[in-house]
Image (tube, coloured by chain):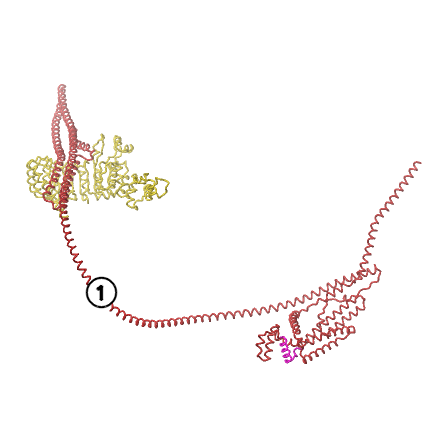
Amino acid sequence: MLQLGSQEVPVTFTQHTLNVEEVDKDPEGSSELSVMSEIQEANNGVSTQEGEEDPSMEVHEEFNKPQVEEEEETEKLIPPQRMIDLQRDLTTLVTNIQTAADAKESMRRTEVEEACRIRLERLENDVKSSQEIFEQITIGWSISQQKTIPQEIQEALNNQQQLCAALIEDKKKLINDLQQELKSGDDRYVKDLRKQAEELDLMMERMEEQITTLIKAYREELAQIERVHQQESEILLTRDETEWDKHLKNLCDEELERLAQRNEKVSEYEAVIHNLMLETTDKYCLIQTEQNTKFQIIDREQQKTKADNIILRINIIKQTDLVAVRKFSLTNMKSRIYSMETHIKNMVSKYSIERNKFNKKCRDLSKDYKRNILQYERIQKKIKHFAVADARTFEEMWLMMEAEVKQLAESVLVIDSQICKQHLGLAWQRPPMEFMELSGPVQPQKQVWRPGGQAVSQLFHTRQALQGSQRMMDLSVGPRLETDSTDMEMYKEGTAVQSVSGAEVHERKLPMETLKKVMELLCDEAGFLMEDTLLNLLAPLEKEEQTVVKLGSLLFAFGMEEEDVPKLAAFLLNYKHQQREQTEVRKDRDEMLAQNMFVLSQGESSNKEEEVETKSTTRVTSELIDPNYVVPALRTFLQQHVRSRESSACQHHSFQVEARDTSQDEAYWESMGNIISEDKMKLWDAAENTLKQYHAVMTDISELVPEIQSLKQQNTELRMLLQQSLNSKVSREVKKQ
Amino acid sequence: MSRSPYPPGANLNPAEHFRNTRRIIAEDPDWSLSIVPCLSDLCLQSIVGNFEENPIFEDLTPIHKDFVQERLSTALPLHVTANLISDGVYWKRCCEQRWDLCDITNYGNSWKRMFFERHMENIIELFIPDVTKPNRVEEMVPLCKNYIKRLDISQLLPPIKETQKEEEDEDEEEYGSESASDNEYIRPSTDHFDFNILLNQLTNLEELHLVYRVKQCGMNFEWNMFEMTDRDCESLAEAIKSCKTLKLLRLHQSHIEDNKCRLLVKYLLDHPSLRELDFSHNLIGDKGARAIGKLLTRSKLETLNMCDNNIRGPGAKAIAYALSMNSTLLSLNLRLNRLRDEGGQAIAKALLNNNTLLHLHLGGNEVTRPTAICLSKALVEKSTLKSINLSCNNLGVDGGRALEEALSNNTSLTECDVRLAEVDEQSASFINQVVRTNQSLQKRRTRENKTKETS
């Protein structure tokens, strides 16, 4: 135990010292030793820096002033040397402490080692001595065991106890010594620490001092250097200035001299130049005049040549222009031809297209035309059909109406007979009622259009009817007259138509000569219708040609066609005859009226007519119409012509459906209405009046009848009452009695 | 902004002046076009206001970028800003808001680098194993991996082990008692922060400074707060091996013993980029020194700092052997070890076979006369060495003389520290003089070289 403890002591001691040192120095960031070394390094660095700076400064100075002498260099070299010394001394001052500390440390180490060694020796000795004592004790134990006597044992034990105590004492002594050593070591450590702290303080102080002194020294050095520099620069400046001034002065003088020289030279040269100028101007004038003349000659020649050249050039230009123009026109033409050709081609193509189109259209139109014709025929058929239907319906209607009217007439007649028979007490005769036998519509046109034989038969028929009626009542005179007049009219018309148709029949027979003559006449008479200009134009022509042209224009003016020309001619020829014939016809009519009374035959009249016609034709051939009648004849013809055209149009329509003449229907129906005559009407009125009176009387009577009845009743009642009263009176009297 | 729109000099004839200058709406005499903000400014303001939802930055013109950077809130989440906003005013503002002292020169004149490095350091220094979730670090990695070049970690917190510690730890960091009670029974998964989750992802990391200690522990002091455990050592070694860009590893005051040193060296062998190694203020002994010697032969180290360790003669011999074979090392620091003459002589002899070493520190190694004689031989024969520190040794008068003689023929040595080496004053001053002349000579040489280059 003790050995171990004694061994540990020095080790811990040294460690302790070391560590405490370090710990104490911690606030400064590093151990004392490292600090020292760092400082040293830093100082070294500073010194080296200085060492580097100085030469650079010198070099700088050398560069600036290479002409500075060596003395100055030596002067300047001195301060750096001083600085180096200063640095070195100061750093040695600082590092001395470190080395001293190192020395102390090494001393301490040797001491520690020595102490360690001594301690170890002492411990070894102690171990040896204690071992001896221990052996003695152990021997003592064995001796004491051998002894049996208690006193001896006691003695031996005491002896042992003493030995042990001595051993313990020795050990205690040793421990005490070691503890004292430790204490002293601790004290020394503390002392060392203090010393080190002092040293550190000292070191820092010295460092600070070093820094301050160095700064001061550097400042001094700097000031000195500056001063030296200033001095040098001042010296240099003054020297340079003086030199500068000198040079300036020299320069000014030289310049002035040169100026004076130059002025002189200038004046000389001016004079020379003036003379030269005069000479040259004279010469120049002469030369100029000469040259002017030369130039004029040359100019003239040149202008001549120029003119020739221009003419030539103009000719050439003209030719070229002409050629160009022709070429241009040619090209133009060519281009136009091309364009035209293309145009033609276009047109041809267009034409073919158009033709095709037209063909197509034609076909279409022909088709349309066929279709229209078909449609037209169909419509005509329809019209026919409708006309037939209309006729039928008309007939039916007619029959129906006739029946009705007949019934009414019958009833009227009955009433009339009643009135006559019963009221008037007259004998009643039935009035003539020929139409009552008739039935169906009246058809006078057919009779007109029939040939003469038929018409005669018709007339006979009517006459027979007349005769029948004449046999009846005298009252029917008016109607008969009327029928006569109608007959007359019918006749007249018939003759007129016959004349026309006759004219138409005869017109073909007209020879070309007469026609020609008529035409000429017409031309002459109607010349006023033609224009003078035309006449003038026709004057040189032959007569025939003139008439032809005139006729053409006339026909055009009349609005006629060439086909109508023969008609016109025939009409004109007939005109006079017709005039005459009309009068004859009137006469004939009178005759016929008379003959009517005497019943003339129709055959005779027709024969007469034929005769007349033959007469007129013969007359025409023999003599032309009176020129005075030409104009009115023309007028009438034109009127007729127009009418005939219209009528022909009408006939064309009524060709299939016979047109009805309604003129006779009225008479027919009126005859029906006139069954009761005016006298009869008067009679009827009177009868009515009387009947009315009678009726009034009768109504009065009828009114009075109930009164009478009531009165009768009263009478009966009164009679009853009287009888009753009478009866009662009797009874009373009886009772009274 | 409500200042008068007219310059003060125009007050002489105000009415006339009004007529001359006021061409727009005459109702308000205070009206000024300068009060009306520009539309572009309004737009930028709205961009600034909605930066978290809709970060627009890359499309802006440089002037507008500056405008936005000056106005953005420093409280914006880092995942929005980290990879979007380049180094500039914004990061300066962030840094100055978080820390009072901001020396940008230590961070390559980059505010952004400074921010992210210090931010990451902060996270790691406050990382408590098994309490702080490792994804807190992992989340930050993609945001800052492009900007971190150096990590200077000044403390690593241990996990909570006992209920007693609860109170103590709560003074510094606040964490729940539940985890503490759990930890009474279950051994923590790691003893300190595990760098494996971090180092292999930081693609630009070049320097790593590590101290296994707890700052401001006060009266809760315990030895294991200042120790790197074996597990820590192994995980750290693996992590460093995975970090291929690392140039500088500084692992000091972390109680590294021989075994840990050997373990670390085992992983550091053939590291592609490591140039500087600092194991100062540890407890590395001869075995560790032997491992270091092996490392020197199998790496391209340029600077090795083993000061304040426990290397003795055998370890120094191993390093010396490696030094004689090495052709990359420029600086070797063996201050405050226990080389003694055995190791000192070995190193001095090794210098005879070395053509690269420039700086050698053998201060405080109990070296005596024989070493000085050997060194003086080396200085005579070789002119590569530029600085040598032999302070705090017992060289003695003879050693000083030997050095004096050696330096009289040497023109390359510019530093030679023989303070407190019990050297004769005459020789010391001579040595100093020689060194000074050499310094001035070297300056001249450099100056001549410069002039040649410039010409």
* Residue plotted at (51% across, 69% down): A357
Q: Residue B198 colored magenta?
A: no
- All told, the count of numbered labels is 1
Residue A531: quarter of image: bottom right
- Secondary structure found at label 1: helix
Residue A573: quarter of image: bottom right
Instruction: Give how far across and how far down residue A137 sits, in percent.
Output: 13, 24
Q: Is residue A275 above or below residue A241?
A: below
Q: Residue A521 colored magenta?
A: yes
Front-lying residue, B127 or B331: B331
Residue A150: quarter of image: top left
Q: Quadrant of the N terminus of chain B?
A: top left
- Furthest-top residue in this view: A151
- In the rendered structure, the answer to whether residue A694 lies left or right of residue A54 reads right
* Boundaries of the magenta span: A506-526
Q: Amino acid at mark 1?
A: Cys
Question: How busy is the neighbourhood of tag 1: few (under 14 within 10 Å), some, or many (20 plus)?
Answer: few
Front-lying residue, A218 or B36: B36
Instruction: Give how far across and how far down residue B398 sits, in percent.
Output: 5, 37
Chain for numbered disc 1: A
**Is any atom of residue B442 visible in this view?**
yes
- In the rendered structure, the answer to whether residue B398 lies left or right of residue A528 reads left
Instruction: Give how far across and how far down residue A491 sits, in percent.
Output: 73, 72
**Is any atom of residue B413 visible in this view?**
no
Residue position for label 1: A285
Colour in which chain B is drawn: yellow
Q: Main secondary structure of the magenta part?
A: helix
Colour in which chain A is drawn: red
Instruction: Give how far across and how far down residue B128 sits, in percent.
Output: 26, 36
